[in-house]
Image (cartoon, rainbow, N blue to C red):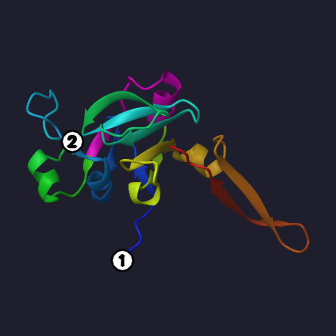
Amino acid sequence: MTKKADEYRVTVLKSNQFHLPKELIEEIGKKSGDRSPIDGACTSWFYHEEQDKAVLANPDVERESLEHIEKCTISGVSNDELESNDHHGGRVTILSELPDRICNSLRAEKHLILRVNYRSDFDRLNYTAVSVYPASKYVNGTLHNVYQKDIEDDTGRTVSTCSTHEDMI
């Protein structure tokens, strides 16, 4: 069995969208219903107040820590393509309905980090959830749940840095 990636780096497009990889659409995508204003595959944006972050997940995810913000279209992926898994990923819009500081921070970035919490790895999750972080803050360790640790050689000189991440959903 191949290990799934737990982190993706994606580019923010001028349209405030980013490419959601096919593997993640399989995890967090859902067919829109007949009476839905959304045409095609969709996902949902959530807000995690304790960690002050945006989260993408299947609209049916059930977690007390997540406040549902709004469903959104996965552009470029129809319901049929989602069902047959015959697509190459799609685009998701960073919604203005997210808290302003989160929305502005994500939209101002060139890249985002998508950190995946797979349902299969966590008994408490009924669906996979993806934390969405500004890449510069994630890499620099300036998020409250990402910690940087300097690795020093025998002389005390810093030779590298490693990150630890406490991603809770």
Residue holding disc 1: 1
Q: What residue type is labelled 2?
A: Ser
In the figure, is residue 40 to the left or right of 61?
A: left
Residue 30, percent from left and from top:
22, 44
Residue displayed at 41% across by 47% down: 129
160, above or below 52, in the image: below
> Which residue of the protein is positioned furthest toward the bottom in this rendering?
1
Is 23 magenta? The answer is no
Residue holding disc 2: 75
Q: Under tag 1, what secondary structure?
A: loop
Q: Which of the two discs, 1 and 2, sits closer to the camera?
A: 1
Q: Quadrant of the N terminus?
A: bottom left
The mark nearer the N terminus, 1 or 2, is: 1
Instruction: Say which of 66 and 84 sits in front.
Output: 66
> Which residue of the protein is positioned furthest toward the front in this rendering?
123
Which quarter of the figure has residue 9?
A: bottom left
Query: On residue 36, which mark appears?
Result: none
Q: Give the range drawn in magenta.
A: 91-108
Is 101 magenta? The answer is yes
Which quarter of the figure has residue 161?
A: bottom right
Q: Are marks 1 and 2 in contact (CB under 8 Å)?
A: no
Q: Which amino acid does label 1 sit on?
A: Met
Residue displayed at 53% across by 26% down: 101
- What is the C-alpha distance between the residues marked 1 and 2? 30 Å
Q: Under tag 2, what secondary structure?
A: loop
Residue 134, percent from left and from top:
52, 42
The 10 Å Cα crowd at callout 2, few under 14, some 14 to 19, many 20 or more, is: some
Residue displayed at 16% across by 52% down: 82
